[in-house]
Amino acid sequence: MAKFIKNDVKIKVLGICGSPRKNANTEFLLDQALDAAKSVDPKNVVVEAYSIAGKEYFPCISCFSCSKTGECVRSKKDDFNELRDKWVEADAIIMAVPVYHLSIPGQLKCFIDRLGNSIWSYEGSAGKHLKVYGAIAQGVHIFSGQENAIKEIINHAIVMGNIVTSGDPWESYLGGAGWTESRTEKNALKNLYESRSFDAEIAVKSAKSLGRRVAELALIIKAGVLHYIDYLKNDPMYRPLIERMKKR
Ligand SMILES: Cc1cc2nc3c(=O)[nH]c(=O)nc-3n(C[C@H](O)[C@H](O)[C@H](O)COP(=O)(O)O)c2cc1C
């Protein structure tokens, strides 16, 4: 019978909250996912929550300097590099957004546009990152853009050379999703959850199973990458992945 060999690997899960409101509904769902991620292996799963609240990300001006240097010319005056560096370092990303106009908020789109071009179109950092991605969308209504917002995040994750997972059936089809029964206050979802609203419980369940699966898959991928490192390091497409492994 085959023996199971246990090699501990450590991973970092970065939760990015795309709401301009601190301690609000999106962050509540993201925290559920990050707690569940941590619970998979508390010793080896490091989680960090990052909020875009109070941060500034200018829009891309299409100068294409970044494809020559890997750096965005606008990053000296805004918060782009801070989040870019955290993104590069993470083994897994859980991106949580409030639904804005059936999609993701403009602030996060500005960040993603510049992240995409400065990493994806620059020879030094283009390639497979194999970060595990999970997406969460939180809206005020139901059937009001959650799936579309999640698809925006999934598209971004794939084009950047990453791997996407959902949580578990029945609650999580594409990721985590919630709505606040038409209430706009910051703690609406938390209050609904504590008063045992069926839909809020589903939202939390979907976020929790998503967080758990993201962490599990990131641990599996990291162990697998270390096993196949001699093969992977010969392929320049895996350079971003290998660079990340070397830094830990
Ligand atoms: C500019 C703007 C656009 C919005 N568009 C939508 C929408 O299309 N669909 C939806 O369900 N909620 C929409 N909302 C509501 C938020 O998604 C919802 O209140 C969410 O819970 C806010 O998350 P937060 O509490 O973390 O800020 C919008 C809110 C704003 C400010």
Image (spheres, grey):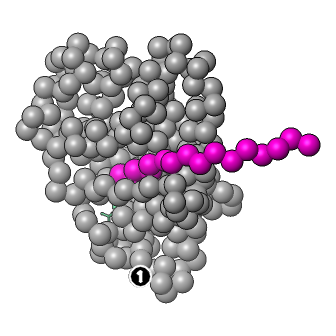
Residue found 52% across the figure and 68% down from its top: 204
User: Seen in the image, is 184 located left or right of residue 142?
Assistant: left
Whether residue 12 is situated above or below residue 248 in the rendered picture: below
Residue found 12% across the figure and 41% down from its top: 78
- Ligand 1, seen in the image, is in the quarter at bottom left
Is residue 106 in view from this perspective? no
Is residue 181 within the magenta segment? no
- Report the residue marked by disc 1: 191
Please state, as top left, top right, bottom left or bottom right, where the N terminus lies in the image.
top right
- In the image, residue 241 lies at what x, y percent? 46, 28
Q: Is mark 1 within 8 Å of ligand 1?
A: no
Residue found 20% across the figure and 25% down from its top: 71
Name the one closer to the observer, 74 or 89.
89
Please state, as top left, top right, bottom left or bottom right, where the C terminus lies in the image.
top left
Instruction: Please identify the residue farthest to the left as the structure is shown.
Output: 77
Is residue 13 within the magenta segment? yes
What span is in magenta? 1-17
- Which of the 4 quarters of the picture holds residue 20? bottom left
Q: Amino acid at mark 1?
A: Asn
Q: Residues within 10 Å of mark 1 (few under 14, many from 20)?
A: some
- In the image, residue 98 lies at what x, y percent? 36, 57
Residue found 28% across the figure and 38% down from its top: 84
Is residue 34 in view from this perspective? yes
- In the image, residue 68 lies at what x, y percent? 23, 13
User: Seen in the image, is 182 located left or right of residue 114?
Assistant: right
- In the image, residue 70 lies at what x, y percent? 25, 21
Query: Label 1's element?
Result: helix
Name the one closer to the observer, 148 or 1.
1
User: Seen in the image, is 202 located left or right of residue 133?
Assistant: right
Name the one closer to the observer, 234 or 53.
234
Instruction: Please identify the residue farthest to the bottom as the structure is shown.
Output: 195
